[in-house]
Image (cartoon, grey):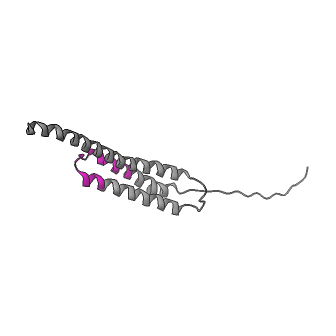
Amino acid sequence: IGSYPRLILQFELRRNVLYFILETYVPSTLLVMLSWVSFWITLDSVPARTCIGVTTVLSMTTLMIGSRSSLSKTNCFIKAIDVYLGICFSFIFGALVEYAVAHYSSSQKCAAKVPEEVRPDVL
């Protein structure tokens, strides 16, 4: 019963999602797709696959650092964008490691075949 004066404070927060999509999500997705292009390059083309792998790893690292600097300065928390970029980085780095493993195993197979081919020539 009666009149009770009160103060009402209402915050309306808006996030510019288009900025994050164009500055972070689209480039990181394109970098992952570019790193997968190396799967279609022949195994013998070492400079091409190495160049694509190293370039995409360094570009993704730069993108990760840039996204951290554009966000708020709460260093103790992991954000969702950090998890997303970390997963993208692991895909890109995995493509580079896959090539290293495939190249090593193919060179080991070639080295194992060479002595077998040399023996008939010696006899």
Badge count = 0
Relative placement, left or right, of 14 versus 122 is right
Image coordinates for residue 36, horizontal then vertical, percent? 33, 47
Was residue 53 drawn as part of the magenta stretch in this picture? no
Q: Name the residue nearer the viewer: 57 or 101.
A: 101
Q: Is residue 20 left or right of residue 112?
A: right
Give the position of the C terminus as an image quadrant: top left
Q: Where is residue 15, by image quadrant?
A: bottom right
Q: Which residue sits at x=43%, y=48%?
A: 90
Observer-nearest residue: 53 or 26? 53
Seen in the picture, residue 43 relative to 75 is either above or below; the reply is above
Closest to the observer: 60 or 51? 51
Q: Is residue 96 left or right of residue 78?
A: left
Magenta-highlighted residues: 30-50
Q: Is residue 37 magenta?
A: yes
Name the spot of residue 60 as percent of width and height, x first: 41, 56
What residue sits 43% from the left and 51% below the top?
Answer: 89
93 vs 70, left or right, is left
Task: State the image coordinates of residue 20 (x, y, percent, origin top left).
Answer: 49, 56
